Amino acid sequence: MLTLPDMQYRRAINPDPTAFADVFLKSFTASEGAEEGEFVSALAADLIKTTPKNDIAAFSAHEGDLCVGVVIFTRLYFPQTSRIVFLLSPMAVLPNHQGQGVGQGLIAYALSQLVGDIVVTYGDPAFYGKTGFAAIDPVVLPAPYPLSQPQGWIAQSLTKAPILPLEGPATCAPALQNPAYW
Ligand SMILES: CC(C)(COP(=O)(O)OP(=O)(O)OC[C@H]1O[C@@H](n2cnc3c(N)ncnc32)[C@H](O)[C@@H]1OP(=O)(O)O)[C@@H](O)C(=O)NCCC(=O)NCCS
């Protein structure tokens, strides 16, 4: 991974929905098209506005005054455990800053700041595998809804403890409570 001496990583205590949405809009419009850009940016703003404050953690990467990368974590709750599980979703880096290590640096920073037991995401193992995520069976770590692409369900322990099976169903943040997203 490249080292980026001018990049600053921050936790956003009161994330600005508009500023975060703007990075998602630019990034996903460039990579997936205008409709997906609108969808993900609206979802990110909704997550920031509607998730209880204790259940969300948002981080950003900055080059000078420019916010170049963003990532949002929200809590997943399981009925019979006190283990703290975070879902990483979504994340984005501005198009002309991609491929320079910003995404990996932002995840590494966020994981160093998060206090919890497990972090899971639903994405491309080719990218997230570079930051410690590995495939996990939804039987071991149940998702909130049936997964259309279970191979994209990937997790890592935030502690030295291995990930032991959790009983579902998991409950996610209100903004993600739509089976079509999964
Ligand atoms: C995915 C994303 C966040 C990665 O951030 P980034 O700053 O470009 O990533 P980094 O530079 O830290 O890491 C790049 C590495 O990951 C790989 N990678 C990056 N994006 C990838 C993707 N979508 N799929 C597979 N691999 C990817 C690259 O091949 C590269 O590998 P290398 O280090 O061996 O060359 C960014 O490309 C992005 O915003 N993409 C569009 C939106 C998106 O897909 N978000 C993630 C889903 S929520």
Image (cartoon, helix red, strand yellow):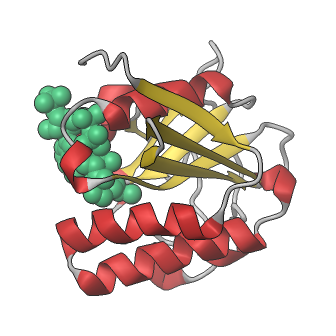
Q: Find residue 82 and report its image quarter.
A: top right
Residue in front for this viewpoint, 37 or 115: 37
- Residue 137 seen in this snapshot: no
Is 72 positioned to the left or the right of 147 in the image? right
Q: How many marks?
A: 0
Residue at the image position 20 percent from the left and 79 percent from the top: 33
Residue at the image position 45 percent from the left and 68 percent from the top: 22
Is 166 positioned to the left or the right of 32 in the image? right
Residue in front for this viewpoint, 131 or 179: 131
Q: Find residue 16 and report its image quarter.
A: bottom right
**Residue farthest toward the front in the current orientation of the protein:** 65
Residue at the image position 38 percent from the left and 71 percent from the top: 25
Is 14 positioned to the left or the right of 97 in the image? right
Residue 23: percent from left, percent from top: 41, 61
Residue in front for this viewpoint, 64 or 167: 64
Image quadrant containing the N terminus: top left
